[in-house]
Image: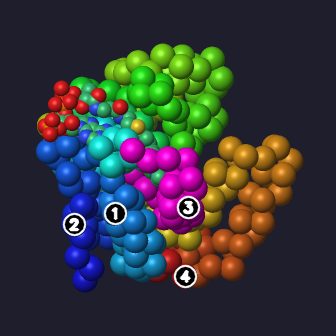
Amino acid sequence: MSKEYEYIVVTERDGLGFIELNRPKVLNAINRPMVSELVHAFEAFDRNDSVKVIVLSGKGRAFAAGADIDEMAEDGAIDLELLNQFTEWDRLAWIKKPIIGAVQGFALGGGFELALCCDLLFASEDASFGFPEVNLGVMPGAGGTQRLTKLIGKSRAMEWLLSGDMFTATQALEWGVINRSIPKELLIEETERFARKLATKPPLSLRLIKESVHKAVDSSIYEGMQYERKNFYLLFASEDQKEGMNAFVEKRKPDFKGK
Ligand code: DAK
């Protein structure tokens, strides 16, 4: 990848795009340039035909311990309004390819919000999740109250958000926040293995399934099913649909092209 990044490490191999948060000395605290770099890297992978699935992780002992508190400590409300960085952040929700988060150590505050932007979450057994913003006199502002509530329901979300407590991977698994809890030493290997499996699937199907599931979170069953149906029909316009079904009939492996 041609662009140089200062706060993240971006690599690509075998159909997978990897983005690693890279401020390990401050537990990958997310500063403003890191947000810009993240959005740039995700969008670049989204446009790159050779990348099928994106894997997001953090270097060192944390996924990310939140937004950079030093950077925002002296901010005023008007500074933040004028900075308008959430507009940039919100573009993460428009990434079309599947994103798998590999979480080790802390995923707190903005770090947890970033994890919640992923489509699937694999976490090491030592991972801890939480929204400590309440302890700083603020509250989540990058989707935490909305995404967590939609994911686990009001009562559980209230407990996490109001208490500011940290929760274990076991708890996160039980409540459906993460997909897998994995021994730390196997986290990247297992996440990659799953990402590779997804990378063999027809990219257009992955794309429209992701879009339809996101739609489900925000719409009535009726509206969501109309949306699903249109996407279902749309896939019958793809070469991969013909290839997938012909391969089944001819008892051979399909060769998907993403077209
Ligand atoms: N910001 C800045 N530095 C941080 C940090 C953070 N969020 N978290 C950790 N660090 C730094 C520590 O200051 C320390 O730096 P040095 O003292 O070594 O220079 C280093 O990382 C190691 O941390 P600790 O020494 O504290 O390590 P411990 O193992 O003892 O404790 C901890 C780990 C995670 C429990 C502790 O570091 C901690 O409580 N960290 C703060 C957690 C937190 O409150 N996070 C929520 C921040 S508010 C936005 C998007 C999102 C947000 C805002 C804007 N936009 C798109 C505009 C979200 C807001 C938040 O996340």
Above-or-below relation of 11 to 160: below
Find disc 3 in the rendering and name its residue: 82
Residue 32: give x, y in percent of width and height.
37, 58
**Residue at 65% from the left image edge and 23% from the top image edge:** 154
Please tell me the numbered disc located at residue 259.
Answer: 4
Residues tagged 3 and 4 counted as in contact (Cβ below 8 A): no
Real-space Cα separation, disc 1 to disc 2, in angstroms: 8 Å
Residue 236: give x, y in percent of width and height.
69, 74
The three-letter code of the residue at mark 3 reads Leu
The answer to which of marks 4 and 1 sits earlier in the sequence is: 1
Residue 223 sits inside the magenta stretch: no
Asked which secondary structure carries label 4, the reply is loop
The three-letter code of the residue at mark 2 reads Glu
Q: Dot 2, crowdedness within 10 Å: few (<14), some or many (≥20)?
A: few
Find disc 1 in the rendering and name its residue: 33
The answer to which of marks 4 and 2 sits earlier in the sequence is: 2
Q: Nearer the viewer, residue 78 or 36?
A: 78
- Examine the rendering and report whether any part of residue 174 can be seen: no
Residue 193: give x, y in percent of width and height.
28, 51
> Taking 242 as reference, is 139 left or right?
left
